[in-house]
Image (tube, grey):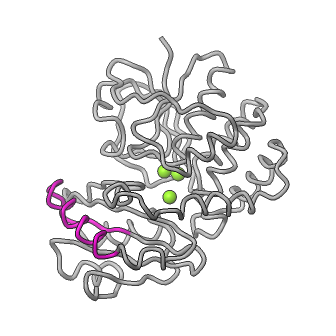
């Protein structure tokens, strides 16, 4: 029976490329390991898989009784629903440490870098395994995605060095240009059903017993959302009620202006004043310089909800 590698719900490019890259590494080291996904893939991830000739990892949501490696998260709420019935063999992640616990020893690689694939590159180096060309390309794209082409405050020199090394292995001359090509695909939101957009990169958090959902859409120009905003707002109101959530936030991130407009629905009327020092106007605030959910949005919110 093989082991599996699985990223978070609503998989992003990092979760999928990590699963592919780690499965290859583990299998090469003699432990048969298969990549899996918990949901449908975004256009950006499909672009990466197509570019480097990969099939989609198998859709698998139940892991009871199986051995799994968890990548790109360590919060139980973001992982498989029956995660408590699986044997967790390892966690490779770059987020805050979540609430996963185990009853058996495990391997943990957690680093405060911009992308899980940067950590997996360190693992390849540690085990002295050569990275195949197509896997290097996919890993490189995941790092460019998670670090917003090095603009995110989560980006470290390790991420930049990894992209350079992976680009060389993959035979890519201009990594940043490929990053821009990817963000163009990501910015093509017109015609997509509103709920699909809201859930495209959506994560739930348990903040001191309160359920908080935070979505993010990263685009080259925020103007693309101008006409959609009332519908987006109405949908997060619905999503809050459906999931019995305390708060739902939707970050509309402009990667060129380097900031985010946040749409806010919350049980706390003064939520953003407490967390970000700014009151909403019509349920919205602009947060200059805010690109990262994990580093700039989640920590002050979590602190303010104590
Ligand atoms: Mg992720
Ligand atoms: Mg990531
Ligand atoms: Mg992200």
Depth check, front residue: 272 or 50: 50
Question: Residue placed at 31% from the left, 66% from the top?
Answer: 302
Is 108 included in the stretch rendered in magenta? no
**Taking 8 as reference, is 175 left or right?**
right
Question: Residue placed at 45% from the left, 27% from the top?
Answer: 68
Tell me where residue 191 appears, x and y as whole percent.
42, 61
Depth check, front residue: 75 or 12: 12
Depth check, front residue: 91 or 250: 250
Q: Which of the 4 image quadrants contains residue 244?
A: bottom left
Q: Is residue 189 above or below residue 102?
A: below
**Taking 21 as reference, is 224 left or right?**
left
**Taking 176 as reference, is 276 left or right?**
left
Is 246 included in the stretch rendered in magenta? yes
Tell me where residue 115 appears, x and y as whole percent.
59, 52
Question: Residue placed at 28% from the left, 88% from the top?
Answer: 281
Q: Main secondary structure of the magenta part?
A: helix
Q: Is residue 211 above or below residue 170?
A: below
Residue with the most extreme front position = 191
Residue with the most extreme top position = 1
Question: Residue placed at 45% from the left, 62% from the top?
Answer: 294
Tell me where residue 74 appears, x and y as whole percent.
41, 44
**Taking 239 as reference, is 74 left or right?**
right
| Numbered range of the magenta stretch | 229-250
């Amino acid at each position: 029976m093989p082991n599996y590698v699985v990223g978070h719900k609503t998989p992003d490019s990092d979760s999928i490329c990590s699963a592919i890259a780690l499965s290859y590494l583990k299998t090469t080291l003699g432990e048969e390991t298969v990549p899996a996904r918990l949901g449908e893939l975004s256009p950006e991830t499909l672009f990466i898989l197509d570019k480097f000739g990969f099939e989609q990892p198998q859709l698998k949501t139940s892991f009871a009784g199986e051995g799994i490696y968890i990548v790109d998260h360590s919060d139980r709420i973001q992982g498989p629903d029956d995660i408590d019935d699986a044997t967790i063999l390892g966690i490779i992640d770059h987020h805050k440490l979540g609430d996963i616990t185990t009853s058996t020893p495990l391997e943990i690689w957690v680093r405060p870098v911009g992308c899980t694939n940067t950590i997996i590159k360190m693992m390849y180096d540690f085990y002295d395994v050569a990275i195949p060309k197509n896997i290097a390309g996919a890993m490189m794209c995941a790092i460019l995605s998670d670090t917003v082409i090095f603009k995110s405050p989560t980006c470290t020199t390790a991420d930049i060095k990894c992209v350079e090394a992976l680009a060389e292995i993959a035979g890519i001359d201009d990594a940043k240009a490929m990053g821009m090509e990817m963000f163009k695909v990501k910015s093509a939101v017109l015609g997509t059903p509103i709920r699909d957009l809201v859930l495209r990169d959506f994560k739930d958090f348990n903040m001191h017993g309160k359920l908080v959902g935070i979505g993010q859409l990263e685009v080259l120009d925020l103007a693309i959302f101008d006409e959609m905003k009332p519908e987006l707002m109405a949908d997060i109101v619905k999503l809050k009620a459906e999931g019995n959530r305390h708060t739902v936030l939707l970050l509309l991130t402009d990667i060129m202006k380097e900031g985010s407009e946040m749409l806010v629905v919350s049980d706390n009327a003064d939520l953003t004043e407490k967390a970000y020092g700014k009151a909403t106007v019509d349920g919205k605030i602009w947060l200059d310089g805010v690109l990262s959910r994990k580093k700039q949005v989640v920590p002050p919110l979590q602190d303010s909800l104590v």
